Amino acid sequence: ALYATRLDASRAGDLAAILSLRGATGSAILAAVPFRSDAQETAHHYLPADPLSRFIALHGALEASSRWWQDGIPLRLAAITMVTSRGEPTAISAAIRAVDEEMQGRIPWYSGISASVRLILAAQLVKYGDTADAFLDEVERMRGLFREVGLRRDDVHEALAVLVLRRF
């Protein structure tokens, strides 16, 4: 019922199809979930003609602005996140780095959120037009709610949970 209010009229049939799959296999359910489709373009996602070339260009732009001690894996994950995003690779890289710096200014040094995780979070925020301040404010708000229901403290998992919840 919660998700029904978030779907537009064109997706109402998709919701009915999903709800009718109770007891079906997991793969049948996943096949019917509307957000799993890459068949359509949205404001945040388009289908590049050559995804590999797009990835290589994005990775190159991110790598050019990285420090010698930085881990390469988050660069690849951030580049993969942005393959279906509009914009020039250098502009996207600059936006990711700017959000990463904003987050670094607000996340305490003793936090469990490492620089690698922060870069991946920054890529997700840029992809969906979110801001570091809005995201981190929401993490703080949700942290209190997580404590109320007895969840243990874990900075990384709390941030990832908020990231996922903000997409619905």
Image (cartoon, rainbow, N blue to C red):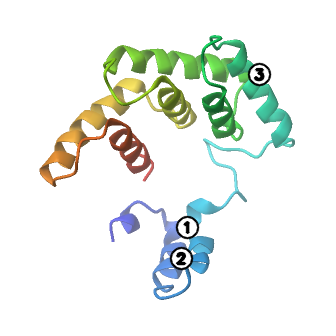
Which circle, 3 or 2, is nearer the viewer? 3
Question: Of label 3 and label 2, which has the lower sequence position?
Answer: 2
Inspect the image, locate mark 1, and give the three-letter code of the amino acid beneath it: Ser
- Relative to 25, residue 100 above or below: above
Q: Are marks 2 and 1 in contact (CB under 8 Å)?
A: yes
Please state the horizontal and vertical placement of residue 52, each as a whole percent of the image. 83, 39
Residue placed under numbered mark 2 in the picture = 13
> Which residue is denoted by mark 3 in the rendering?
60
Q: What residue lies at 63% left-to-right and 39% top-to-bottom?
A: 81
* Quarter of the view holding residue 112: top left
Q: Quadrant of the N terminus?
A: bottom left
Using the numbered discs, state the Cα–Cα distance from disc 1 to disc 3 in whole angstroms: 39 Å
Name the residue tied to disc 1: 10
Which amino acid lies under the numbered mark 3 shown in the image of this protein?
Answer: Gly
Relative to 25, 141 lies left or right: left
* 111, 137: nearer the viewer: 111
